Amino acid sequence: MKQKLVFLTGSGISAESGLLTFRDMGGIWQKYNVYEVATPEAWETNPQLVLDFYNWRRKQLLEVEPNEAHKIIARMEDKYDVTVITQNVDDLHERAESTDVLHLHGELRKARSTCDESKIYDIKGWELKLGDTDEKGCQLRPHVVWFGEPVPTLQKAVGIVKQADIFVIVGTSLKVYPAASLIDYAGYNVPVYYIDPNPAKVYRKNTEVISEKATKGMKVLEEKF
């Protein structure tokens, strides 16, 4: 039986594909006010601006490709039972051929009904417009978790981390909660590898920090595995 290898990935892994990160210098939040584009209140106040913002992000996503870090994670499936838990809303893990990906914060290339959250639709192309509706005429919104909204897949993620034989964190500051709390659910004796050029302090045993960007750090990890 293969060992259970669980990854938690953040914006740092996608940055090397050319996607802007939220909090790094020159990142998205320096161009947009978060409260105007990524909250339920923003949607109520100015849905067109919200759609424009996510359309811009979706268009950018379609112009980039998975990088070597995404591809190494996918290759790990040859040796391990791999699950990827990602804070990212892009689909680069799937495009790199990872087969088991859990999105904590939603998926950029999907929309959902404003009347029924269980109704989720693929977005063809990059544009979602006012007037795009579900079968009952309800407006579609980006299928992302906005600030102030609960993270519906969190408990599933907790269960996955509890099953991990090895836990790997790639490209995240461990400052965004509740995702950052997932490390606390890894078993006491489970080895943890943390790949990030500016890693947060991790106060737990069996943790190895690799202070590199995602692609270089994953190459180091691949050699270890």
Image (cartoon, rainbow, N blue to C red):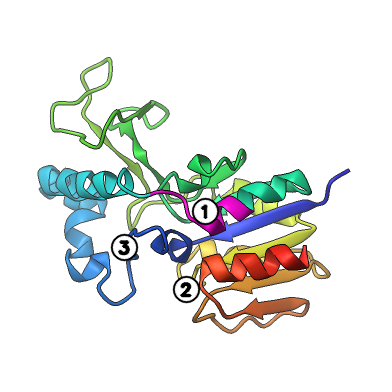
N-terminal of the pair, mark 1 or mark 3, is: 3
Label 1 element class: strand
The secondary structure type at the circle numbered 3 is loop
Mark sitting on residue 86: 1
Circle 2 is placed at which residue position? 175
Mark carried by residue 20: 3
Dot 2 falls on a residue whose secondary structure is: loop
Q: CA distance from mark 3 to mark 2?
A: 18 Å
Q: Nearer the viewer, residue 77 or 177?
A: 77
**Magenta stretch: includes residue 68:** yes
**Residue at 20 percent of width and 35 percent of height:** 127
**Rendered residue at 49%/50% (across/down):** 104
Question: For the magenta stretch, what is the residue range?
Answer: 65-72
Q: In the visual, does 134 lie left or right of 225? A: left
- Mark 2 surroundings within 10 Å by alpha-carbon count, few (fewer than 14), some (14 through 19), many (20 or more): few
| Crowdedness near tag 3: few (<14), some (14–19) or many (≥20) residues, C-alpha within 10 Å | many
Which of disc 1 and disc 2 is earlier in sequence? 1
Q: Amino acid at mark 3?
A: Leu
Q: Position of residue 170 (x, y in %)?
A: 56, 65
Give the residue at x 62% y 47%.
74
Residue 26 x %, y %: 25, 73
